[in-house]
Amino acid sequence: MAGYYHGTNKATGHQFKANVTHAWAITNDKLSQFFLAMDIVTIIS
């Protein structure tokens, strides 16, 4: 999944829209791995 997280930083009041990617691996019909990458700098600034 590729998309965005958006919201408001509670500490600063700054609104953000940050890129995010989720990747899943499935083995034997079960979730075996999960990877999440997001633009943290956008969220905290």
Image (spheres, helix red, strand yellow):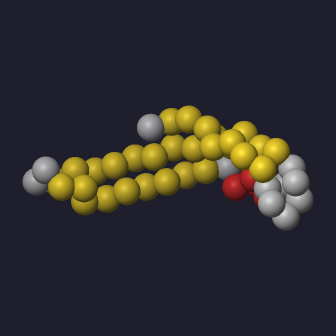
**Residue found at the far left of this picture:** 28
Residue 42 at least partly seen:
no
Q: Position of residue 35 (x, y in %)?
A: 43, 55
Q: Residue at x 67, y 49 (%)?
A: 39
Q: Is residue 27 visible?
A: yes
Q: How many marks?
A: 0
Residue 18 lies in what quarter of the image?
top right
- Which quarter of the figure is the C terminus placed in? bottom right
Asked if residue 44 is positioned above or below residue 5 in the image, the reply reads below
Give the side of residue 34 with respect to residue 38, left or right: left
40 horizontally vs 12: left or right: left
Check the image and report above or below for 13 versus 15.
below
Identify the residue at horizontal 31%, vertical 59% (top origin). Answer: 33
Looking at the picture, tell me which residue is in the foreground, 16 or 23.
16
Q: Residue at (80%, 60%) from the top-left corner?
A: 10
- Residue at the (78%, 50%) spot, across then down: 8
Q: State the image coordinates of residue 28 (x, y, percent, origin top left).
A: 10, 54
User: Residue 41 vs residue 23: left or right?
Assistant: right
Q: Position of residue 15 (x, y in %)?
A: 82, 45
Drawn side of residue 16 relative to residue 4, left or right: right
- Up-down: is 27 above or below 17? below
- Quarter of the figure with the N terminus: top left
- The residue lying furthest to the bottom in this view is 11
